[in-house]
Image: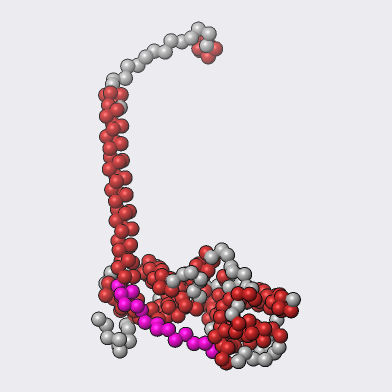
């Protein structure tokens, strides 16, 4: 059992994993699990269990381990695998649920009404409802656009950081962000019309 | 639409949503690492043995086919070839020309 207080010697651990040392592989999984599960949780598609997705990420990591050349830090390399695995699952979900006023809870409807009809900030005690609304609205976007907006606006990552995480070039990310925001703007206008009617 | 404009609905919604922190445990569940490692190591071994098994089977089939083809054509291989004079057709233009020459 590894001592949790000691920092993991990642290079040594990887070397032992390449020599098919199962104890080292377990140590590596335990070390990287918090990083992977955070990514999986923030991009988790509907009806997919987070543990199943995390398992898929680690299996891909072991399968592709020989391809890791050390050009980027190992956690960055694993993060990219986690992000691409999530996006593959998002793309596999062909149908996106329609966003309807009727499906919102009372608080969510109030918060949404508040943001589209006036310019007041959302009260702190409605943060949870706002969080839920943001995720429901993101579900209306294409998977790639969803990922970009989530990373930009929720996780507040820079374009360069997103490029590193996804492997997409910066222009493509900007185009996707622009397209996604235009779609969100249209959605807000439609919601405003429906709310009035 | 300027997304950074705090007056925009999306900007205000995301600003509020960012206040929600995920307090769930991020440690690997008990047995997760063991299970994942076992699957990863077993699948790499089984894929290797699958290739090996197919390779040996292919060698076996190729050997059997080689022996069968030799056995079936044994008589043809051992048969002494007898040169046969082809009868020249009388109405063959080429042969007639050659005879003239």
Q: Residue furthest top?
A: B90
Residue B20 highlighted magenta (yes or no): yes
Residue A137 highlighted magenta (yes or no): no
Q: Nearer the viewer, residue B73 or A49?
A: A49
Which x, y percent locates residue A9? 32, 82
Which x, y percent locates residue A58? 38, 71
Residue A72 appears in which quarter of the rendering? bottom left
Majority SS type along the magenta span: loop
Q: How many numbered badges does the structure rendering display?
A: 0
Residue B100 can be seen in this image: no
Residue B64, compared with residue A81, is above or below; it is above
Residue A82, compared with residue B90, is above or below; it is below
In this picture, which residue range is highlighted in magenta? B18-34
Which x, y percent locates residue A186? 70, 75
Residue A11 appears in which quarter of the rendering? bottom left
Task: Give the colour scheme shown.
Answer: secondary structure
Which x, y percent locates residue A144? 57, 71
Residue A117 can be seen in this image: yes
The residue that appears at 30% across and 36% down in the rendered structure is B65
Please state, as top left, top right, bottom left or bottom right, where the N terminus of chain B lies in the image: bottom right
The residue that appears at 28% across and 21% down in the rendered structure is B79
Residue A136, compared with residue B66, is above or below; it is below
The residue that appears at 69% across and 90% down in the rendered structure is A119
The residue that appears at 53% across and 8% down in the rendered structure is B91
């Amino acid at each position: 059992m590894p001592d949790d207080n000691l920092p993991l010697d990642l290079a040594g651990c990887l070397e032992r994993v390449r020599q098919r040392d199962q104890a080292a592989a377990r140590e590596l999984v335990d070390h990287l699990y918090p990083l992977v599960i955070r990514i999986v949780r923030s991009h988790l598609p509907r009806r997919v269990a987070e543990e199943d997705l995390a398992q898929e990420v680690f299996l891909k990591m072991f399968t592709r381990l020989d391809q890791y050349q050390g050009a980027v830090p190992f956690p960055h390399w694993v993060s990219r695998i986690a992000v691409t695995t999530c996006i593959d699952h998002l793309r596999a979900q062909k149908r996106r649920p329609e966003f309807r006023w009727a499906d919102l809870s009372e608080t969510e409807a109030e918060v949404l009404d508040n943001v589209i009809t006036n310019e007041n900030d959302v009260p702190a005690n409605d943060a949870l409802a706002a969080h839920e609304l943001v995720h429901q609205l993101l579900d209306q976007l294409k998977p790639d656009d969803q990922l970009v907006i989530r990373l930009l606006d929720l996780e507040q990552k820079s374009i360069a950081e997103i490029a590193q995480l996804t492997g997409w070039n910066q222009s493509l990310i900007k185009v996707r962000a622009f397209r996604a925001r235009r779609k969100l703007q249209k959605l807000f206008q439609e919601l405003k019309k429906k709310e009035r009617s | 639409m300027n997304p950074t404009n705090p007056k925009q609905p999306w900007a205000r919604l995301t600003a509020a949503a960012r206040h929600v922190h995920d307090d769930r445990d991020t440690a690997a569940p008990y047995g997760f690492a063991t299970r994942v490692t076992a699957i990863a190591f077993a699948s790499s071994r089984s894929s290797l043995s699958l290739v090996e098994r197919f390779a040996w089977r292919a060698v076996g089939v190729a050997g059997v086919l080689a022996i069968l083809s030799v056995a079936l054509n044994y008589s043809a291989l051992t048969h002494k070839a007898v040169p046969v004079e082809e009868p020249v057709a009388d109405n063959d233009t080429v042969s007639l020309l050659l005879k003239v020459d």
